[in-house]
C-alpha cells in the first residue's frame, strides 16, 4: 500500500506522511541546481498549515530559522546596530541554508517583519 507514492508498511500516522511530502515539495521548490523549465506539480497532501509566518526581526534569535533570500536558513550569527539620528536599529543576520549548507546574509530594520519557515525535525531509527 502507498500514500501519495510513499510506502505505508511502517504504519505511521497520516500527519507524518504529510510532513514528509511537504519536505519533499519544499526541497524540490528550493532546489536551484537544476534551473531548467521543470514544472513542479503539487497535488494535495497538505494539512492546511502555513509554510511560513511573520516575525519581527528583533525577535529572531540565534539557532532559530528564517528565510534569507527566499531560502530556509538556520541563524548562526546575529547582530543589532544602534539607531542613527532619525533612523531605525538594523539587524544583521547570517544563516546557513538547511538544505544546501550555503551561507546567506541579510540586513533589515529591527521593526520590520521577516518570514520564518515552519521547520520540524524528525529523527527516525
Image: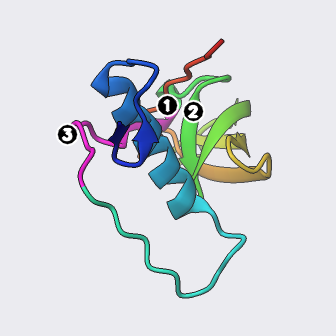
Residue at 68% x, 46% y is 99
6 with respect to 94 (left or right): left
Q: Does the magenta stretch include residue 51?
A: yes
Residue 5's label in the rendered image is none
Residue at 56% x, 22% y is 121
Looking at the rendered structure, the secondary structure element under dot 3 is loop
- Percent across and percent down for residue 107 are 63, 51
Q: Which of 63 and 100 is in front in this view?
A: 100
Looking at the image, is 35 positioned above or below residue 47? below
Quadrant of the image containing the C terminus: top right
Q: Nearer the viewer, residue 90 or 13?
A: 13
Crowding at mark 2 (Cα within 10 Å: few <14, some 14-19, many 20+): many
The Cα atoms of the two marked residues, 3 and 1, are separated by: 15 Å
Q: Name the residue under label 2.
A: 65
The Cα atoms of the two marked residues, 2 and 1, are separated by: 8 Å
The Cα atoms of the two marked residues, 3 and 2, are separated by: 21 Å
Q: Name the residue under label 1.
A: 119
- Percent across and percent down for residue 95 are 71, 41
Among all residues in the image, which is located at the extreme right?
102
Question: Which span is picked out in magenta?
Answer: 44-57
Q: Name the residue under label 3.
A: 48
Quadrant of the image containing the N terminus: top left
Residue at 36% x, 69% y is 41
> Could you tell me if the residues under marks 2 and 1 are in contact, i.e. CB atoms within 8 Å?
yes
Amino acid at each position: 500500500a502507498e500514500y501519495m507514492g510513499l510506502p505505508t508498511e511502517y504504519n505511521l500516522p497520516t500527519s507524518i506522511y504529510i510532513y514528509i511530502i511537504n519536505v519533499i515539495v519544499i526541497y524540490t521548490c528550493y532546489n536551484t541546481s537544476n534551473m531548467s523549465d521543470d514544472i513542479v506539480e503539487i497535488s494535495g497532501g497538505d494539512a492546511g498549515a502555513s509554510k511560513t509566518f511573520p516575525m519581527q526581526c528583533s525577535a529572531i534569535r540565534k539557532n532559530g530559522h528564517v528565510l534569507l533570500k527566499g531560502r530556509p536558513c538556520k541563524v548562526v550569527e546575529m547582530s543589532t546596530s544602534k539607531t542613527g539620528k532619525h533612523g531605525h536599529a538594523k539587524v544583521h543576520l547570517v544563516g546557513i541554508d538547511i538544505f544546501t549548507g550555503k551561507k546567506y546574509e541579510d540586513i533589515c530594520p529591527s521593526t520590520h517583519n521577516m518570514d520564518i519557515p515552519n521547520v520540524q525535525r524528525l529523527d527516525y531509527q
